[in-house]
Amino acid sequence: MSTPWHDPNNPQHWPQPEAQQYDQYGQPVYPQQGAQPAGHDYYPENPNGYGAQAQQPGYDQQSGYQQANPAPTYDQQNPYGQQPAAGQFGQFDQYGQQLYYPEQNAYTAQAPQQQQFMGNGGFSAEGYYQQAYTPLNPTWMGQVEPQNYTPAPNYAPVQPIQPVWTHQQAKRTGRTLNVVLMLAITCTVVALLLIFLVLPNLYRSAGPAGIMVGFLLSLFPLAAVLLTIYFIDRWEPEPRWMLGFALLWGAAGSIGTTLLIQPTWVKLFMPKDLSKAEASQWLASFEAPPVEEFSKGLGILLIALFARKYFDGPVDGVVYAATIAAGFAFTENIQYFGRTFVDPDGGALSLSIMFIIRGIFSPFGHALYTACTGVAVGYAARKGNVGMIIGFFFIGLIPAMIFHYIWNSAPSLFEPTDIASFLGSVFLQSVVYEGPLILLWGIGIYFLRKSEAKLTQRRLAEYAQSGWFTPEEVNMIATPVGRRNALAWAKTYRRTQPMKEFIRKSTSLAYTRQRILVGASQRQNQQDEKELLDEITALRPLVLG
């Protein structure tokens, strides 16, 4: 049984040189190339790891397969090379890419005769480019400025891609230290808020028995939201420990922040001489939306600023926002359910009605509101600008507060006269006010996922041009159908886990390159790029067996 993609790097498919010799490293020596080893070298004397002797692929007119041309030289300042020297096609543009036709732009020129263009941005089954690559993305993808553009590291597939690197523990970098520092400080603050504010508040509201009952009942809506987040996050899964941090911030940090801000907000803005019913309605409509959305959004902002490596776009924003909101709703539900349980005028019937309202009819409310902030911060994070991230954080809070206000202040659509009519009113209210929002977010997430797949294909196409992937592998990684077929094939050979890792690391590589191209932390992201390329190289033989 063959692999799910045709591998042009298979030795059976290579043209054999007329006279072939090997040097001390086991690399072929071609007399016409000046007896220099080809491919990806890891010579001890080369401190950069990506050697100056690497070869750049060109096209052999007779066989149609890639042959070696001189590659760019590498230096300490730019480990991925300066402008390439002139090769087979003679000229290079401002981005360091070869001009197939000197009189035309490399990204809009027609292809050489042996290349086939199919018009969908990928590659043909024969391994040729289907359309010319355009380095500048649309603004919604994250605009790539010309001064930030650098070619992908070069690796010529003249020899099979072999496991030339053994995975070792990565060195701790400044960015890793930032993440550790953020987690340490934030978790300390969250622990203090939990001990001195959140738990005492729950204890006063519900008592030990109420907390226990509320905790058990709150697990059901929490599970529903987390399963939805898992479905959304399948394309490029976020680290579990980062999602755990987001959940912790929602369950304790955002609740504690709300309890800290709430008294000051009420003192500054609450009108005087309100009745008990009016005061309750004012708190629900004019205090809860701004204070709670700011407290939840603060966790999104912390992740985007201090763990930028794990925040690649709007979909990540939705995932982190919904996770934080799920934690917030979990703690809030414990209070509501527990307080209803210990209420002497309540009983099992009141508890059941409260569970239906909050656990069945509206479990996604907080996630939908806070996702507005997540999308805004995610868009800005893709641009890589700290000032823009902070600005879009406040912009995203506006729709989040508005949607929260609409739900909290929405009047009942008809006056219930008994329990059945009351539940019918709540259901209709959920459909009218929350239903369209759920539908809108479903459509939005679908198109955001499509854009993530397109970005993955665009970025990996650049590595395919440099020989790190075959064209078929790019289509496999960057399309849902390709991933399903690859995993189905890997399952028959018991290679599912290496295949999953290969896809995950390759997707992370695409987003790392996107950060490089928008100019975000160039040195750190280039180091991450190198590590991912090494890991992918080591995974390849495990996938192919």
Image (spheres, helix red, strand yellow):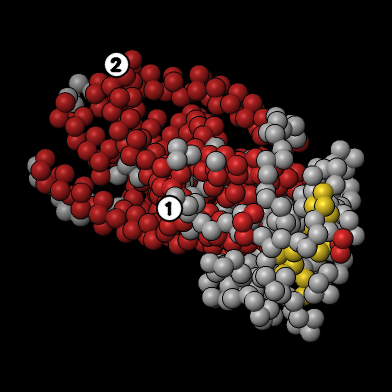
Helix, strand or loop status at disc 1: helix
Residue 74: give x, y in percent of width and height. 87, 53
Where is 222 relative to 518, above or below?
above
Q: Are marks 1 and 2 in contact (CB under 8 Å)?
A: no
User: Residue at coordinates 86% horizontally, 64% vertically from top-left?
Assistant: 32
Going by the numbered disc 1, the residue's amino acid type is Asn
Say which residue label 1 marks. 485
Question: Which is nearer the N-term, disc 1 or disc 2?
Answer: 2
Going by the numbered disc 2, the residue's amino acid type is Ala
What is the distance, in whole Å, between disc 1 and disc 2 at their CAs? 51 Å
Crowding around mark 2 (Cα neighbors within 10 Å: few <14, some 14 to 19, many 20+) is some
Whether residue 296 is visible to the viewer of this picture, yes or no, is no
Helix, strand or loop status at disc 2: helix
- Nearer to us in this view, 133 or 265: 133
User: Residue at coordinates 53% horizontally, 72% vertically from top-left?
Assistant: 120
- In this image, 527 relative to 52: left or right? left
User: Residue at coordinates 64% horizontally, 76% vertically from top-left?
Assistant: 114
- Nearer to us in this view, 148 or 424: 148
Residue 52: give x, y in percent of width and height. 86, 52
Where is 135 relative to 540, above or below?
below
- Nearer to us in this view, 16 or 439: 16
Crowding around mark 1 (Cα neighbors within 10 Å: few <14, some 14 to 19, many 20+) is some
- Nearer to us in this view, 289 or 469: 469
Q: How many marks?
A: 2
Residue 533: give x, y in percent of width and height. 68, 46
Where is 334 relative to 320, above or below?
above
Residue furthest top in the image: 208
Say which residue label 2 marks. 209
Residue 459: give x, y in percent of width and height. 63, 59
